[in-house]
């Protein structure tokens, strides 16, 4: 994934502040970076950690086998089944004043993304799809609670509509819904949300009690036997800087905790199996895929703030990918599907 992986080396020192908080995620030399062991080159060859260059593989060499989700046996030749049978996808969408273009980019890319998922994971029993805002401004379940799945939008620039009923009978969509239409309603969260974006607090709350308890807001969305795909879309960092300090106005505190804490919470939500999670972060990145700078103090609507902490969090995962939040999302999602498929094939069933 040339486009997704090329940013890692440039930002490794920046991400190290947060990603290295847990020494168990550093190598003996202290270097921090993605967990993969090779880098893709422009000619299709790869370089491993020693610098040795391997020749480019042909299409026949790299063509993946047809996915038989839930089939196969373990590496030891036993009878244990591998492969996911279900996929839970949660989109964490920034609804602040600078996000109109980014929400439109997501809505444009989603139909092709979900169609490709259905094709590549054609034996999967089904998908759960949910949307959460980066603030606690939902009024349709528990007012003020973070991580509540969206069923109704009302903010400035939103779909301004009730998106339910969903086929699940609950607050998440499934493969049995008209997903492009339902997602267009739910994901168009608008631009009237809180400027103190807290995407990590929102997604952790979405995947943990009380929201996941029986009878609660997100009941039935997160399934033990499903691969979890988290899509984060924001043009600002999730940090503890205050806007009062930066611009002389209101505080902006960010999500509680540090990237290592976020990592631990997400992994715990999937029963401690880190490889059963895929993270797709469309955020502010550095060159060569940088967005223009975002002037937070001038309420700018273009560009993005480099999200060092979110980048560090994403790269802690075996299946973690980063793309620029500005521009066309379709290439990012199409590349990401290949790794979602790999993660599904490697899925470790709950104990």
Image: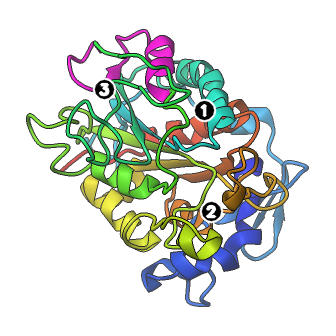
Of tags 1 and 3, the one toward the viewer is 1
Is residue 179 inside the magenta stretch? yes
Q: Is residue 137 visible?
A: yes
What is the residue that sits farthest to the right in this orientation?
43
How packed mark 2 is, by other alpha carbons closer than 10 Å (few <14, some 14-19, many 20 or more), is many
Q: Is residue 169 above or below residue 348?
A: above
Residues shaded magenta: 166-187
Image location (x, y in percent) of residue 266 = 34, 57
Name the residue: 67% across, 51% down: 299
* Nearest the eye: 145 or 250: 250
Pointers 1 and 3 in contact (C-beta within 8 Å): no
How packed mark 1 is, by other alpha carbons closer than 10 Å (few <14, some 14-19, many 20 or more), is many
Image location (x, y in percent) of residue 175 = 38, 16
* Nearest the eye: 250 or 295: 250
Q: Quadrant of residue 148?
A: top left
CA distance separating discs 3 and 2: 28 Å
* Nearest the eye: 84 or 222: 222
Q: Is residue 74 above or below residue 23?
A: above
The colour scheme used here is: rainbow
For marks 3 and 2 on the same chain, the one whose residue lies earlier in the sequence: 3
Which of the labelled discs sits on residue 172, or is there none?
Answer: 3
Residue, disc 1:
103
Which of the labelled discs sits on residue 307, or is there none?
Answer: 2
Q: Quadrant of residue 90?
A: top left
């Amino acid at each position: 994934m040339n486009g997704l992986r090329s940013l890692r080396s440039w930002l490794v020192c920046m991400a190290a502040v947060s990603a290295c908080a847990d020494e168990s995620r550093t190598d003996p030399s202290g270097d921090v970076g993605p967990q993969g062991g090779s880098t893709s080159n422009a000619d299709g060859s790869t370089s491993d950690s020693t610098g040795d260059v391997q020749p480019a593989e042909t299409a026949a060499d790299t063509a993946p086998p047809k996915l038989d989700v839930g089939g196969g046996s373990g590496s030891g030749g036993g009878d244990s089944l591998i492969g996911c049978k279900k996929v839970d996808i949660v989109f964490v969408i920034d609804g602040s004043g600078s996000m109109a273009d980014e929400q439109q980019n997501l809505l444009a890319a989603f139909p092709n993304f979900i169609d490709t998922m259905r094709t590549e994971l054609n034996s999967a029993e089904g998908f759960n799809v949910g949307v959460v805002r980066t603030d606690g401004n939902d009024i349709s379940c528990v007012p003020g609670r973070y991580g509540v799945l969206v069923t109704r939008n009302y903010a400035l620039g939103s779909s301004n509509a009730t998106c339910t009923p969903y086929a699940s009978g609950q607050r998440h969509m499934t493969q049995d819904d008209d997903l492009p239409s339902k997602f267009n309603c739910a994901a168009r969260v608008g631009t009237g949300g809180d400027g103190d974006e807290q995407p990590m607090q929102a997604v952790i709350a979405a995947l943990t009690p009380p929201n996941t308890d029986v009878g609660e807001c997100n009941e039935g969305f997160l399934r033990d036997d499903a691969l979890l795909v988290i899509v984060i879309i924001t043009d600002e960092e999730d940090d503890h800087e205050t806007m009062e300090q930066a611009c002389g106005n209101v505080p902006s505190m960010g999500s509680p905790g540090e990237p290592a804490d976020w990592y631990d919470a997400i992994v715990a939500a999937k029963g401690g199996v880190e490889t059963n999670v895929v993270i797709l972060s469309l955020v502010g990145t550095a060159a060569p895929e940088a967005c223009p700078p975002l002037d937070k103090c001038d309420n700018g609507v273009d560009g993005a703030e480099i999200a060092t902490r979110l980048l560090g969090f994403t790269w802690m995962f075996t299946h973690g990918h980063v793309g620029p939040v500005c521009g066309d999302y379709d290439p990012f999602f199409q590349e990401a599907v290949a790794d979602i498929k790999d993660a599904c094939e490697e899925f470790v069933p709950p104990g």
